[in-house]
Image: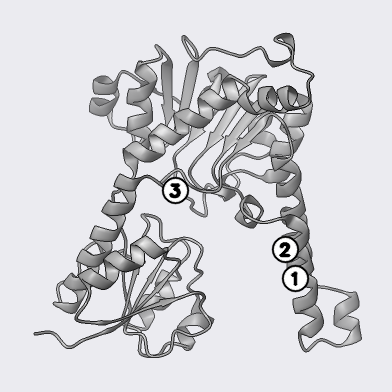
Amino acid sequence: MATAKRIIFLETERDERQWLERELAQHDVIFADNADDLTGADILSVFIESQIDRDLLDRIPSLRFITTRSTVADHIDLVECRRRGITVSNVPSYGEYTVAEHTFALMLGVARRYREAVDLARHASFSYENVRATELHGKTLGVIGAGKIGQYVIRFASGFDMRVVVHDVDENATLAQQLGFHYVSLDELLATSDIITLHAPLTQANYHLFNRDTFAKCRRGVIIINTARGRLIDTDALCEALDSGIVAGAGLDVLEDERVLRRDTSHIIGEQIVERLHADFGPRELRAPDAARLRELEVLVQNHRLLARPNVLFTPHMAFNSVEAVERILQTTVDNIRAFIDSAPINVVSA
């Protein structure tokens, strides 16, 4: 029988903890509320909000395995993990249907102007004219990224009789024929799409893929949907595009700074000010904060402004959050842990 391991989980909820404790009963399973105390961990399981960098790894010299309960692993310094001999695994597949369904929920919500209608009704100023909707039927849907999630979005679009165009770095002619879409250049997708939905991973190459230049090439009145990664879109540029009418509305499950999806911005800024006052800075440093910190505050405030717009429908990074998807995540995570302990790791993420 394998030696019991100290396994620490971050970002878990009560029902998840009960299941994990039962499945890993032979091990020392700990559920931490934050990354302050990960002492002695052999195995660490995290979700998307835990940043695993060199400083954190320095505090856990015993660590040998990280399993992230997500498909993406851009919150983990994979190069540093490899250098230290730490194996990293992920959950390659769990939420294709769930995220695709949520994508259409946002798409319909923006096109039907649900948020604006509810706000007007609450203020007793409702009129049909002010919230006249747009049909999805017959519209051109531009899909950026035809991976597993993107493919389900394309399938769902056929039910609305939408024309689908796709931009992807890897083109698959057989897939295009099977699902009935056409590959196009990014510029053509921008110019012809009534609705654009993002399903691409975040890379150095596509950071701020949607910026001022990109939005300028879009068909006027386009709807933008993002259930992928927040940093695919430059928040400043999106706000400007909404102001100018280039973008008619946006449905967002992710942001550049996702703290504002769950907490009041004033509280976040207040905490940062207190943290800086308690830090070991002299008067000069307090008067002249570094550029990175200023930019962080700018992004925070801009994200807050974005969510305040009536034509922006947002959800707090919950596209994955279905009973079925969470079950798949937990089962794969336990499978990853057991396989690593048995010296046969699976779902390994390469640097």
Picture disc at residue 268 = 2
Q: Name the amino acid type tagged 1.
A: Gln
Q: Name the amino acid type tagged 3.
A: Pro
Q: Residues within 10 Å of mark 2 (few under 14, many from 20)?
A: some
Where residue 36 appears, x then y in whole percent?
53, 82
| Callout 3–callout 2 Cβ contact below 8 Å | no
Number of numbered discs overlaid on the protein picture: 3
Of tags 3 and 2, which is closer to the observer?
Answer: 2
| SS state under label 1 | helix
Q: Nearer the viewer, residue 292 or 43?
A: 43
| Callout 1–callout 2 Cβ contact below 8 Å | yes
Is residue 147 visible from the viewing direction of this image? no
| SS state under label 3 | loop
Q: How much space separates mark 3 and mark 2, taking CA atoms? A: 27 Å
Where residue 160 appears, x then y in whole percent?
41, 14
Q: Mark 1 points at which residue?
A: 272
Picture disc at residue 84 = none
Quadrant of residue 346 in the image?
bottom left
Quadrant of residue 342 in the image?
bottom left
State left or right for residue 9 relative to residue 36: left
Q: Nearer the viewer, residue 224 or 159?
A: 159
Q: Which residue is drawn at 52% across and 27% down?
A: 107
Where residue 334 appears, x then y in whole percent?
24, 66
Q: Name the residue under label 3.
A: 201
Rendered position, 50 above or below 281: above
Q: Which residue is drawn at 44% across and 48% down?
A: 201
Q: How much space separates mark 3 and mark 1, taking CA atoms? A: 30 Å
Of tags 3 and 1, which is closer to the observer?
Answer: 1
Upstream in sequence: badge 3 or badge 2? 3
Q: Name the amino acid type tagged 2.
A: Ile
